[in-house]
Structures are given as C-alpha cells and as structure tokens.
Image (cartoon, helix red, strand yellow):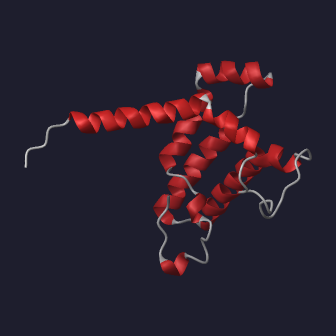
Amino acid sequence: MSKVTPDENDQFKYAWMIRPCEIYKDEYNECKYWKSRFHQYFIHGHKIDCSSWQKDFQNCEIWQAIKSEDAYNAIIQSEKERRMNRLKGHFRNTTWKKRDKPPEDWNSPLPEWMQENYKNSYLEKMKTKEAQEASEMINKYCVIM
C-alpha cells in the first residue's frame, strides 16, 4: 500500500486501493504463463488481455517514484473496474432480497425437536470427547509444589 502524507490525503483519498507494485507484476506474469493461457482458453474460449496488469505495473512504478496524478488516476480507475467486474454477479443477483438489518428473531432458541437431535449429533459427541480428553490430559501431569 502506498504511503501518503496528511496534506495529500484529500487529493489521493483512494491510495489505499493501490497494491504493491510487485503484485501487479506477478499478476501480469501469471496471466502470460502458458498454463494460465490454457486455463483461460478452457474457461473463456479465448486468451485474456493481460495488458491491463502491465499498464498498472508501469503506472504503479511511476506513482511510487514521482506521485504522478495521471498514474494514480489510471491505477484507481483500473482497480474500480476490476472490483465492479468481480462484484457483477452480486449486483445482478435478483434471487435474494437484500436486507438492512437481521430478522427480529435471529437469535431465538432452537425448537425442541432440533435441540433433541443436536444431543445425539456427531458434533455434540465430538465436543464431549474433546472435553474428556482435555480433563484426562490435566490429570496425567504431575505437579510438584
């Protein structure tokens, strides 16, 4: 992450989005790798354009060296586009209703039948087994006072 002085804080308020330059270089190299190319062809049916990673690496080096505002804006724009592409499925999802707060009874006790089933569950047996093993381990130690 880039370090910015307090005076530049308002001008470069999205500097936290800029990754270390090595990451952009690694992403570019990974994108160009032959195994990645095979994967891209298998998943997308064509090779993906890796030039955005290369441009971001170059802009990141310029940003690190001289704090160029053009390089900063290019990196931030690219990061925002990447973020929107990553979250595209989330925003287009119309199956689930998004809510602002949890339901009123989100922490109410489980129904009786579910509590009974839980008593005989594998998870409960493992908890009791772990508790027994812990108490046995405590009893095995010899303490000299």
Q: Number of numbered discs present?
A: 0
The reply, left or right, for residue 79 in relation to residue 67 is right
Q: Is residue 29 visible?
A: no
The percent coordinates of residue 114 (x first, y second) are: 73, 39
Q: Is residue 105 left or right of residue 60?
A: right
Image coordinates for residue 111, horizontal then vertical, percent: 76, 46
The residue sitting at 60% across, 78% down in the picture is 10
- In the rendered image, the residue lying farthest to the right is 94
Mark yes or no: residue 66 visible: yes
Please tell me which residue lies in front, 14 or 63. 14
Residue visible at 58% across and 24% down in the picture:
33
Identify which residue is drawn at 82% across, 43% down.
89
Residue at x-position 50% and y-position 58%: 1
Vertical order, 130 against 97 (above or below): above
In the picture as drawn, the residue positioned furthest to the bottom comes out as: 7
Residue 106 vs residue 91, the one in the foreground: 106
Q: Position of residue 55 (x, y in %)?
A: 62, 46
**Residue 6 image position (x, y, % from top left):** 50, 79
Q: Is residue 97 left or right of residue 58?
A: right
Tell me: 99 left or right of 16: right
Residue 124 occupies which quadrant of the picture? Answer: top right
Is 71 located above or below residue 141 in the figure? below
- Which residue is more in the foreground, 29 or 102? 102
